Each structure stands twice: as structure tokens, then as C-alpha cells.
Amino acid sequence: MFKAKIDSTMLRECIESLTAIVDEGKFRLTESGLKLRAVDPANVAMVSFELQRDAFDLFQFAAEEASSEAESDSKAELELGLDFVKFLGILGIGGRDEIELELDENVQKLYTRMGSLAYTISLLDPSSLRKEPKVPELEFPVQVILETEVFRRTIRAAEKIGDHIVLGVDGEMFYMETEGEMDKLRLGLRKDQLILLTPGTVHSLYSLDFIVAMSKGMSHVENITLNLGKDYPLRLDFEVAEGKGKVSYLLAPRIENE
Amino acid sequence: MFKAKIDSTMLRECIESLTAIVDEGKFRLTESGLKLRAVDPANVAMVSFELQRDAFDLFQFAAEEASSEAESDSKAELELGLDFVKFLGILGIGGRDEIELELDENVQKLYTRMGSLAYTISLLDPSSLRKEPKVPELEFPVQVILETEVFRRTIRAAEKIGDHIVLGVDGEMFYMETEGEMDKLRLGLRKDQLILLTPGTVHSLYSLDFIVAMSKGMSHVENITLNLGKDYPLRLDFEVAEGKGKVSYLLAPRIENE
Amino acid sequence: MFKAKIDSTMLRECIESLTAIVDEGKFRLTESGLKLRAVDPANVAMVSFELQRDAFDLFQFAAEEASSEAESDSKAELELGLDFVKFLGILGIGGRDEIELELDENVQKLYTRMGSLAYTISLLDPSSLRKEPKVPELEFPVQVILETEVFRRTIRAAEKIGDHIVLGVDGEMFYMETEGEMDKLRLGLRKDQLILLTPGTVHSLYSLDFIVAMSKGMSHVENITLNLGKDYPLRLDFEVAEGKGKVSYLLAPRIENE
């Protein structure tokens, strides 16, 4: 049994952070909230998402004898396969109202209600969705926290120039660099222009397409955290739902051929 | 002879209500104002339009021996064939100025003037335009008056889901319902959420394409009246030009196959 | 050596006035500022551009033994081949910051910096660009100064109707006229509706495509000056960079066939 109410703007931001990477996926519902982990179809980017139950105005959950094998009650969970792109469209039409959600497990439908508008969504069969990926164990020597808008603006500029982007830290300077056939763009931010910087000497190359996609998932976010290494994956973290939700994007590096 | 002045924003709203259904048509000009009745090319939707002479800041009209056979003077009328889509474009460029209209019957041209801008439109030959349809006699058991914005927003949502929409009244509840392959959208409004409702039990299915088109013809309108029956045409009425103009859309129902 | 700083919004307006006619071109840099003269690929329209050194917040220039033959020091100049369309895109991403420019003649690169963003542009080889055109000697009997917005709005309207436009003066009246297959648009402005008018009787026909393009190069300009004659080229002048820059468009007339 799952029944909940949540601010629809808040939920929209959450779903937006998912559609940056995947079109559909399965939420794992437990009594502590909502979780999701998914990789993009090309297996290059991953999103980990978590929304605490206290982000909801109402949150009722009970899994009787759980969906899978016998688990301890506290671990009981439900799976909820959803077309996020469609769900985002629905959230867009309800305006700024609160949204009510109610799961009917038997018919695998999610009933939603925003004001006078009722919307019934057929859930996707979880077994038809790709398996939840494992999060690799990673250690990042360097961390940078910066304003999302600076990051997004640089990505929009980089898009016009090249296909790849270098994210790096050189001493006390964070930089983003893209080279095109003829031109070169470089953003350099000193420690005092950032919210946080771990000094170091690292840089990695990433495919711009994925960074562009990610940058669309964080349009309402103030700050983002970049976790970097040398020729290493990028983990980009930010908070949603007024701090009650967490999103992490993980992106594999590209090999520089020079 | 026809010569008139009217607020161009007001005229634009009128023409917009026509282009929702037809691209071109013929106005019938009489000394009491302007009328039009036309069906869409597929013969599924009809628009009836009427604009009183007092919607105009100036309205001079005289039909010498009228256009057709000998009629009594008071019934004298002129026909004015117009490409509404083009006319709407012209109204858009004149800004918010008053527009002057002057008909030259001999050369079949309409002279328009907005500020310093003069625009001469060649009229369409009325005989080349489709004949004015007859309005069928209809009696509607149920009437609903609601805010245009609620209706329009629901239509925009329904568009994403299905091809048809049910409009109905169930007791003291008005509803709009669309079913897609997997999803279902339903707006339900109680009597107290509406401006007016005749209680009853009726519902009809309509093609969404036409309802969508209609909803584009009423973007500046506050309230609309829905006249409904059981498996019956829909008549959707609203006022334009500060109540000095009336628009009615009529739409044939679709047969539900269940 | 060339090094400069300038308000990026100001520079953007300048470049916009160029991209209306050409995609790329070469600036001639001297110690008094920046000049350019170029024709469009079809050889129908020409742009002459000039930006004084005092439009810059910083302007350092020195040409050692100049680019061409031995010239007197005061005539020394550098050529700077630039893809204006790309440059405009770059200026767009820097926001409203000041932009710093620095030319590296050896590697033929222009280094630009807007806040924390550094952008390196490879210059175009000046010898690969079309030669600077000669400005024909012209005498215009009639001059009209009008608000840019009136001109632009009329052009937008004319575009919907025809392919050509007549610009003319008839006594103390300036007019713009376009005829389509069925319709006709005419803007008529009396002397008192204009900022300046030399009375006369002239008119010429021009290709609308080019006038439309030109009208896009002056979006931030308050007034424009039209220099007209009888079946004669049009010279359209306006100021940019708060009066420290000048733009002239020259457009060949079309022959009226009646």
C-alpha cells in the first residue's frame, strides 16, 4: 500500500533530474522514502536518486510480505515502474497544486490527483525494465562546489564548439575546457570564486552530450558538487526538494588521444 | 457602402474565434452588424458568429438594392469574402491601434488603415466560398458554464493522452475524460466549482482534434458555456468584443464503440 | 600588437549590424579604431562599418612595419579576419561582462576573455576573404530620418505580402509600399511624423530579402537615416556604440517592370 501527497513543483524537479539520464525506470519504495538507480541506454551515465519520506506532505506505506522473498519487515519494499517523460508531462499540466499519489498494486496502476484533475497511469512492468546497476566504488581526490548557473552557462557555450570537455583542478583553480577545430573555450575559477575547492592536480575528459543532458536535470538547483579525479569518472551531486532529496550523476571518462 | 472603425485587439479576438474552425469565409453585413456561419472543411464543426454594430466605434452601412434579389430595405445585406488567416496576420502587425475598414464593392477590395499603415485586401469571390450551412435544430438538456482556462488546460492535457474526449454531467458533477492506451485523465468539477450547472445524466464522445482547435479560438475569453446531451452534438458558446459579439461552435459527436 | 577592452553588449550590437549582411569579413585595425567594408555573397548589399577607438575602455595598438608595403607610420594597420556569426555566439554567452581582446599576430589567434571565461578564436586568413569593395560615389537628393521600430514593423508586415518594396518620398510624405498578388500594404508618414524629411519626389524598388536582413542588424538602434533617389541605391545609416560607431548599408535598386 502506498499513498502520498507532495508539492507538485517539488516532484517535477525530482523527475526532471531523472529524465536527464533515463526515460523510464523503477522507483523502490520503502517506508523511509523513494529510491532509484539507473543507467542511460548507452551505459555511460548513471543516476542515483533518493527522496526522503519527509519531503512528502503525506506518506503512507506498507508492503505486506514484500514483493520479493521473505525479508525482514523493515526492509520491505515495493517496485514502481514509471515512464518518467510521460509523468513529467502530467505534472506540467496540474499547475502548482499539490499532487496526490495512490498505488493500486493489483492492477499495477498509479492514481494521481491534482486539484480537480485525476490521472491514472499504467505502471511499467518492473521486470521489463533494465536491472538496477551497481554503483562502482570510487574515491575522488578532489571536490569542487560551484553555482549551477556558471556551470550551465559554460556547458551551453562549450556545446557550440566541441564534442568533449575537460573538467579539472590545477592547484587552487578549477577549470572547464573545450577545444573545437579552430577555437578553444576555457572557464577558470579561482578558489575564492567557488563555494568550495579541494586543491589538487587532476583532470578528465568527458563526452559533452552527457554533460549537456545532466545540466538539463538541474535547472532549479542552486549549487552542484563535482567530484573529480585523474582520468576518472565524474560524480556530480546536488540536492532537490529543499534538501530532502539527493541526486548523483556518475559519468565515465573518455580517453584523451593526443 | 460599408465603412467602420473598431478596436483592433477586439477585432483580432473575433477573427481568432473564426480561424479556429475555418480559414476563410463570408461575412454578411447588415445595418445591425456582421454575421457569419461556416463549417470546417471536414463538415464536422460549425461556427456561428455575430458582431453587433455597437461593437464598432463607427459603423456606416448602406446596401443599394442589395446583393441578391429584391429584398425589403431593412433586410439589405452585403457579402464580404475574406481570407481570415491572412487578415489575422495583418491585424497582428498594426499593434493596438484602432483599425479603419472601408469596402469598395466595385473592385471588391477592403481598405484597412491602422495608424500610418494602409492595407488593401482583395476580397474573395463569395460564390467561390462554400455555402452557409443550416444550423440544425437542437435541444440541449444540460448546460455547464465554466472558466475557459480550466477547460483549455484540460484539453492540453488530454491531447497528450488520446484522440477522443468525453464531456458529461453526472448528477451535480461535470466531467471531461480521455483514455489513452495505458493512461486515463479525468477532470471532475462539482457544481460549486462551476459558474452554472444543470444537473442531469448525459455524456457524449467528441474528436479531440476539433475540441483542441476550438480551444484556440477562445484564448481571451473568461467563461464558456457548454450545451450537452446524450450522444449528442456539443454547442460551445462564448462572448467576444466585451459582450457585443457572440460565437457558437457546434460539434458532431463520435460514436462510442465499446 | 592589439589589445582592447570593450563593453560586450556594445560589441555585440556592432557585430550584429555586420552579420545582417555578411557571415565573415576582415576588420582593418588602425590606431584610430576599427573599420570594415564588405559586400554580401550575391553582391547586392554592402556594409560599411567604423568603430572609434574611444568606444573602447582600453585600446592599445601598434603595427610594426605594417602588414602591407612601407606606409607612413600613421597609416599602419593590421587585418583581422573573423567569423562574425561564431563571434556573435561567443559574445552571447559571456553575459553583460566587459570583454578583453588580444591579438596574437604570429599564430593568428584572437584571445578573448569575459569574466572567468577565456575564448581563443583562430582568425581567418585575410587573403582567403573577399576583397574589400569600393564604395561607389553617390548623391542622394532625399533624406529621411525615422524611428527604427516603425521601419522594422513595416518590413515585418511587408514580408508577409510580397518580395519587393518601394521606398519613396512624395512631397512632404515618406512612404513604403509592397504589393502582393492580391494585397497591398502602404505605410505613409507625414513630415511631422518623421524626425527629418527632405521634401522631393523620388522612389525606388528594392528586394525585400535584403531589407529584411538589414532590419535585423539594427535591433537596438533608435533612429535610422534613409538616403534615397529615383531608381537609385538606398543608403541606410545608423549609429551604434553610443554614437562612437557608424554603420552604412548600401543596397542596389531593382528595376520595376510594369
Image (cartoon, coloured by chain):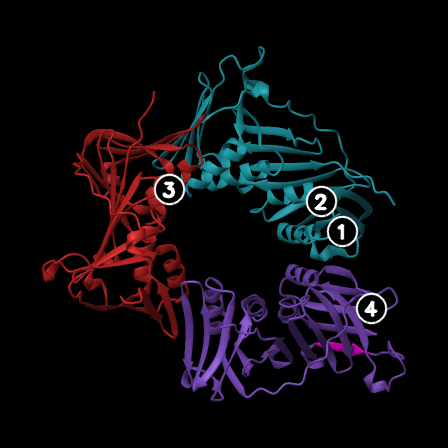
Chain colours: A red, B purple, C cyan
The secondary element bearing badge 1 is classed as strand
Q: Give left or right: position of A251 versus C28.
A: left
The residue wearing badge 1 is C178
Q: Chain of mark 1?
A: C
- In the image, taking residue B110 as reference, residue B180 lies left or right, namely left
Give percent across and percent down for residue B230: 54, 83
Mark 2 → mark 3, Cα distance in angstroms: 39 Å
Q: Residue C45: name its quadrant.
A: top right
Is residue B56 in view from this perspective?
Answer: yes
Image marks 1 and 3: residues in contact by CB distance under 8 Å:
no
Residue at 63% x, 78% y: name it: B248
Q: Earlier in the sequence, mark 2 or mark 1?
A: 1
The chain holding disc 4 is: B
Which callout, 1 or 3, points to the residue nearer the camera?
3
User: What residue is disc 4 on?
Assistant: B127
Front-most of residues B66 and B211 = B211
Mark 2 vs mark 1: tell me if same chain. yes
* Amino acid type, label 4: Ser
Tag 2 near tag 1, CB within 8 Å? yes
Q: Establish whether labels 4 and 2 are both on one chain.
A: no
- Three-letter code, disc 1: Thr
Q: Is residue B58 magenta?
A: yes
Q: Check disc 2 and report its element: helix, strand or loop.
A: helix
Seen at 31% across and 39% down, the residue is A43
Q: Marks 2 and 1, how far apart in space?
A: 9 Å
Q: Which residue is mark 2?
A: C208
